[in-house]
Image (cartoon, rainbow, N blue to C red):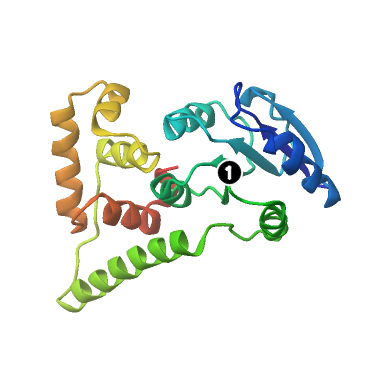
Amino acid sequence: MSSSAFLLLDEEPINTIGINVLEPLLKTQGISVTTGINILDVPVGTRLLFIETSSKDAWGKLKEQLVNLRIKCDIVLFNLDENPELANRALLSGIRGVFYTTDNADVLMKGIRLLLEDQLWYRRDIMCNALNRMLQFNKDALHKLTEGDIEPVKLTKREKAIISLMSNGSKNKEIAEELSISPHTVKTHLYSAFRKTKCRNRIELLSWAQQHIPDEIR
């Protein structure tokens, strides 16, 4: 059974890597490729959705696009500048891989083959950073567990909604606008979530949420 991919291109791309390099490489793997500039054009049955992410507000634009995505598929970002924070956000959000503007054809091909094997494609430093965060969180959680029985954490619907938006990269002001509440109220709910989960910062809170309530923050 053949696979299909869709290349979601920027209206004003910084280069032609999508058409001139990525598309031919995908076709060498027997993948049917279509392209477009509108997320609504992604056809049903698409396995891999490659999203060009080269604009200045790349994360903000990506969130807008994904809100309108109507199908389930693996998402890969390409044409990224050297932006570790964006790559970290992508990894924590479940995006399968990232390709950079500096990646050559050999790197792209290696990544494509691994993605087709249902593996992730991230640079080692990004993977190590995420793993270290998770290990530190688990270490702290284990230490707390040995201190005595812990009551199940019960977050409110509002707290879960805020964590969900935060996992997509939204800042407090953006979360406040989305939920029609004040930034101060957002902070109050976050502090409450920190207290309940024993997390010290947003990264630990996101790690906790990925472990304990993954279906509620997607």
Vertical position of residue 180 compared to residue 57: above or below: above
Closer to the camera in the image, 40 or 120? 120
Vertical position of residue 108 compared to residue 166: above or below: below
- x, y percentage for residue 148? 15, 75
The residue lying at 50 percent from left, 49 percent from top is: 94
Classify 10 Å Cα crowding around label 1: few (below 14), some (14-19), many (20 and above). some
On the question of residue 30 being in view, the answer is no
Kindly state the secondary structure of the residue where label 1 is placed.
loop
- Left or right of 44? Residue 180 is left
Residue bearing the label numbered 1: 101
**Residue 212 is drawn in which quadrant?**
bottom left
The residue lying at 44 percent from left, 30 percent from top is: 56
- Left or right of 78? Residue 158 is left
Quadrant of the rendering where the C terminus is positioned: top left
Closer to the camera in the image, 212 or 184? 184
- Left or right of 50? Residue 218 is left
On the question of residue 184 being in view, the answer is yes
**Residue 35 is drawn in which quadrant?**
top right
The amino acid type of the residue labelled 1 equals Thr
Vertical position of residue 202 compared to residue 71: above or below: below
- Left or right of 203? Residue 70 is right
- x, y percentage for residue 104? 67, 52
How many circles with numbers are drawn on the protein?
A: 1
**Residue 131 is drawn in which quadrant?**
bottom left
- x, y percentage for residue 28? 85, 50
The residue lying at 53 percent from left, 47 percent from top is: 95
- x, y percentage for residue 13? 61, 28
Closer to the camera in the image, 112 or 215? 112
The residue lying at 33 percent from left, 63 percent from top is: 133
